[in-house]
Image (spheres, coloured by chain):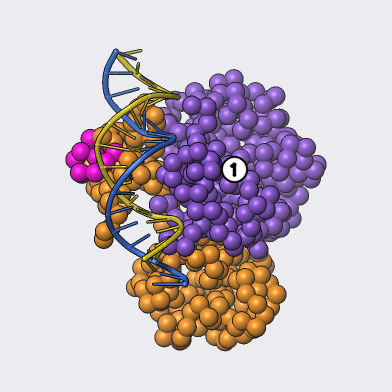
Chain colours: A purple, B orange, C yellow, D blue
Amino acid sequence: MHEAKYLKVARIVQNRIKDGTYKTQTPLPDQEALAKELGVSRLTVKKALDGLERKGLVYKQSGLGTFVLGDIPIKESNDAAANGFFGLQEELGRDHISSEVLHFTIDFPDENIQKNLRIKNNEPVYNILRLRRYDKKPFILEHTYMPVKLVPNLDYVILNDSIYEYLHKQLKLKFSVAYRKIKAAKADQWDQEFLKAKKDDLILELEQIIWLSNGQPIEYSTSRNRFNERNYVVLETKSF
Amino acid sequence: MHEAKYLKVARIVQNRIKDGTYKTQTPLPDQEALAKELGVSRLTVKKALDGLERKGLVYKQSGLGTFVLGDIPIKESNDAAANGFFGLQEELGRDHISSEVLHFTIDFPDENIQKNLRIKNNEPVYNILRLRRYDKKPFILEHTYMPVKLVPNLDYVILNDSIYEYLHKQLKLKFSVAYRKIKAAKADQWDQEFLKAKKDDLILELEQIIWLSNGQPIEYSTSRNRFNERNYVVLETKSF
DNA sequence: AAGTGGTCTAGACCACGAG
DNA sequence: TCGTGGTCTAGACCACTTA
């Protein structure tokens, strides 16, 4: 099977929401009708709609129907999704984002990194510091650690391009879970030097661990930006 | 049916993870075995495990099995889940949290509130400012707007206790989706007065809209705390 | 009463990973 | 090849909402 039917159904419905076939606050066709139209069983339609509900596109009400949720007022263009597994390039566009590698070594991990990446002290990690620019302007200071054993042959060419693409398209690695923490901090020396922050300026930091679908942590990183350059947004829906 | 079978299965598995019956990084019994043991079909077991996977408790690998994911190293006790629909009391314990109502009026909504709560300019809203204390210490400054028509008979007694509990247990309202934005800001006059922040101190703000399961926005609010008092964490997994 | 989504089953077949 | 999880179906019944 090339693509799961429920994914195809979800994509079709999502497109119909986007192009206005299904309008905000109005009900979709009922599950049985969609199933008939698309030639699948009702359970398959339901599975697709469950996913769209978790993504916040629709809401369902037993006894009434499934409705398009509509736009989110406080969403702005420069907000970053704190959920989702897209790299900066994917998120903001390849043409806008460039990377400058400030530091790139292979180190033995300290205790903190060992714990976060669930590795032993003799398993080397990449230690990467990159300044990401948005339209040439300093934007995000990104400090990344990855186990060498999981990411062979990382080099400057990849770092100047997109790590994310290398992991996914070249190495075929699949992300499963990410745990992210968002905090505020004061600008340190590096922030002042590279992000052009002033002393005592406000910095927003995203700290994260990303796991592969086999349960192995693949990345521990922090991303720092000036407080007025970028916010983080989270869309939360029920797990079940 | 009192409780759905898949919820019961999820609860049982979750408890077994918590009490150590299923240990970190080890496989659970296969779906067929669990189904047999618990007297349900395999699909019901799968549905339960899908939910636990989205909550980040387990990960599944086709062809291998389902594994316990284990602890998250960067998680700390004073972090707040940016996902989940629990009130402060639920999250940190009834005994620790107290509330002081600083402002409580019924207003006509301005344009921003109208948009965020999807209401007209003649539909009144509660305008509530509360200082939440943690063990008597100023902790969070919470500014909340809610449509009056959705929340009848709100009063000081409820505000001093828990809005969350009133909405859920008394009014039987169900939350479906929340959209949250996290940003850094400088302390304003109120932060300085009530949170004991100094001028130019760092403030972390959570701005959110919460929808009911019928698609109607029920709450627009901001929660501000000093940068070193509280961070926000997000656990992200795939929607499908 | 009618129509919606929610749950559940038994059975089938597929895709993936290990030996 | 075997055992795992992933998908899909048809059919059944339940719970909820509106009329």
Where is residue B152 shown, x and y percent of the image? 47, 83
The residue wearing badge 1 is: A12
Residue in the picture at 52% in, 27% down: A2
Q: Is residue B41 magenta?
A: yes
Question: Between B15 and D4, which is closer to the camera in this rendering?
Answer: D4
Magenta-span inclusion, residue B211: no
Give the crowd class for mark 1: few <14, some 14-19, many >=20 residues within 10 Å.
Answer: some
Picture coordinates of residue B139, whole percent (x, y): 49, 71
Query: Residue at the location (70% across, 33% down)?
Result: A101
**Rendered view: B218 above or below B35:** below
- Left or right of A3? Residue B73 is left
Rendered position, A153 above or below A230: above
Q: Residue B145, percent across and down?
A: 57, 76
Q: Is residue B182 in view from this perspective?
A: no
- Under mark 1, the amino acid is Ile
Left/right placement of residue D19 relative to residue B30 reads right
The residue drawn where x is 53% and y is 71% is: B218
